[in-house]
Amino acid sequence: MTQQQEQQQQKQLQKPSAVQTDEHKRRSLGFLEMMFLVQTVQVGIGLFNLPRVVVEEAGHPGWIAVLIAGVAAHIAIWICILLTRRFPDLDLYGMLTRVYGKWIGWFFGAVFMLYCVAMSALVGRTYVEVVQLWMFPTTSTNMFYLLLLLPCFYAATAGPRVLARLATLVFFATSWMLLLLIAPARQITWDYYFPIFFNTTLWDLTRAAWKVGASMVGFELLLIFHTFAKDKKKTLKAASFGNGITVFIYLLVTLVSIGFYSAGQIIKVLSPTLHMFQIVELPLIERIEHIGISTWSFLIVNTVCTYLWAGGRFLYTFGKWSEPVCVLMLFPPVFLIGIMGRDVFFLTKFELYLGTIGGLMSTVMPLFLLLSAMILRKRGGTSAPPAPPEDSQEVSVS
């Protein structure tokens, strides 16, 4: 072999393979996709009863708790971004292994994976309960829950690029529902907002903000899909804008609800947001709240499939299976957890406990991991798993 042929062979080896090029194109998330991915995962079923929760804890000044929770969520996002900048090529599971070692990192990664599985089951099962309560009370719970999981797992196996595009579609497909607040906003009683701090302490606002924060979780998944961002320097801005949209929606719904209901009425209504939709009158539509609940299914599917994909990344990182297979392996536990709850009381307790865990996962865990990395002087490293086998087969065929 001549020297010229050896140089040509070395150049060919240095060029990125077709699989790597296709993986980069297929899994590069833009600014808007990152923003909508964070925002749509945050907004879930908790918005239906959010006004009642804040009023129970802090009275009619409970809307201030939404702002407090929004600021706390932004600080937590900033901590997550500091982690991603310290480990730019690692997702959360890789960070845990890098900082704590293989087995301890595997343990904490398994805990986060179980959290994602439980969150997927809770969001899906709670939505089924709402649909049965308002629309189909005689429908089989297990069958309806199974039908809801099918599109969730189908979307979760498609990868982060499809999930980001789905999040963008879901945002524009559901944003029109804010127009339903116009009718109740016209019936606001302004006296319900005053006096602002009557019989409300800072501790009351803190407890209310913690419960609002439990409804804002979802941004912690940024530690999983940040490795697929096109421009990682804009990740903080994208996540902050997404969180800002969520805070605006939560604040708007809470303010309208507090002004529409009295303090004594709102704590007696299970889902104040849905009950407000009942006063909306359209010429050709009788029950507008049914359309709102049906449209909300897009948000539910988006949230569930994103958590499923994040949980499947644990099996994909530490296992030897393809990415779609890892996601499908989570189907039995998600289904079993969902059918365990037979009444609204069980789901309420489950939501309370998991909300507390979600708050710890989104705030305490990133901070503790960042401090551990700084103390142990750990940074960088590349342990991103290779492209799934399905991608290489598609490229070779093409």
Image: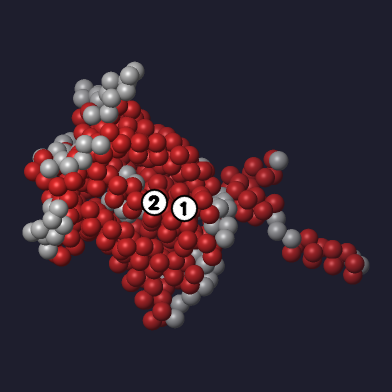
Q: Kindly tell me whether residue 110 is visible in this rendering.
A: no
Comparing 306 with 276, the one in front is: 276
Q: Note whether 172 is above or below 237 in the view shown.
A: above
Q: Is residue 176 left or right of residue 161?
A: left
User: Picture coordinates of residue 34 (x, y %)?
Assistant: 49, 53
Crowding near the residue tagged with mark 1, few <14, some 14–19, many ≥20 C-alpha atoms within 10 Å:
many
Q: Secondary structure at mark 1?
A: helix
What amino acid is found at the position of numbered circle 2 in the picture?
Answer: Ile
Residue at (48% x, 72% y) in the render: 86
User: Residue lying farthest top?
Assistant: 284
Q: Kindly tell me whether residue 306 is visible in this rendering.
A: yes
Of the image marks 1 and 2, the number of the one nearer the N terminus: 1
User: Picture coordinates of residue 118 (x, y %)?
Assistant: 29, 48
- Is the residue under label 2 in contact with that under label 1 (CB below 8 Å)? yes
Q: Is residue 302 left or right of residue 278?
A: right
Labelled disc at residue 281: none
Comparing 300 with 202, the one in front is: 202
User: Picture coordinates of residue 385 (x, y %)?
Assistant: 53, 58
Residue at (39% x, 68% y) in the render: 79
The residue labelled by disc 2 is 245
Residue at (34% x, 18% y) in the render: 284
Labelled disc at residue 35: 1
Crowding near the residue tagged with mark 2, few <14, some 14–19, many ≥20 C-alpha atoms within 10 Å:
some
What amino acid is found at the position of numbered circle 1 in the picture?
Answer: Met
